[in-house]
Image (cartoon, rainbow, N blue to C red):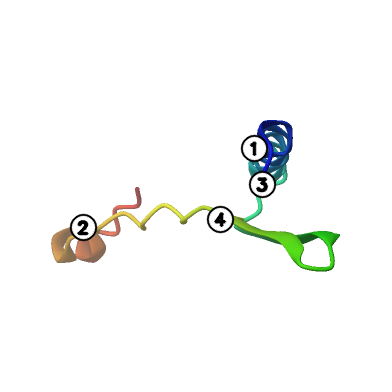
Amino acid sequence: MSKTRNDADVAFIEALAELLNRNDLAEIDVKRDYGENDSLKVRVSKQAAPAPVISQAEMMAGIDR
C-alpha cells in the first residue's frame, strides 16, 4: 500500500468517524473495492454509555438521575 493511499484511507476513516458522531450513529460498516484482489473493510463503532447505577434505596424513594 502506498503512503498516499494510506493517507487517503486514514482520511476516509476519520470522515466516517465524524459522520458517526454528527448523526448520532452507533456503527458504520463499509467495504471499498480498489481492484480485483484489493479492498478495504472498515467498521467504525462506538459503545453506548452505560446506564447509571441506581441503588434500591433511590428506587424506593423515587429518585431519578
Mark-to-mark CA distance, 3 and 4: 8 Å
* Residue 22: x %, y % from top left: 70, 39
N-term mark: 1 or 2: 1
**Residue at screen point 51% across, 53% down:** 46
In which quarter of the view is residue 38 placed? Answer: bottom right
Asked if the residue under mark 4 is in contact with the one under mark 3, i.e. CB atoms within 8 Å, the reply is yes
- Which residue position is annotated with label 4? 45
Mark 3 or mark 1, earlier in chain: 1
User: Disc 1 and disc 4: Cα gap in Å?
Assistant: 15 Å
Q: Of all residues shown, which one is farthest toward the left?
A: 57
Foreground: disc 1 or disc 2: 1
Mark 3 or 2: in front is: 3
Residue 65 can be seen, yes or no: yes
How crowded pointer 1 is (Cα within 10 Å; few <14, some 14-19, many 20+) is rated as few
Mark 1 residue element:
helix
Of the residues shown, which amino acid type is indicated by label 1?
Val
**Going 41% across and 52% down the picture, which residue do you hit?**
49
**Is there a contact, CB below 8 Å, between mark 1 and mark 4?**
no
Pointers 3 and 1 in contact (C-beta within 8 Å): no
Going by the image, does 21 lie left or right of 38? left
How many numbered markers are drawn?
Answer: 4
Q: Give, as a three-letter code, the residue at label 4.
A: Ser
Q: CA distance from mark 1 to mark 2?
A: 46 Å
Q: Quadrant of the N terminus?
A: top right
Q: Mark 1 highlights which residue? A: 10
The Cα–Cα distance between marks 3 and 1, rounded to whole angstroms, is 15 Å
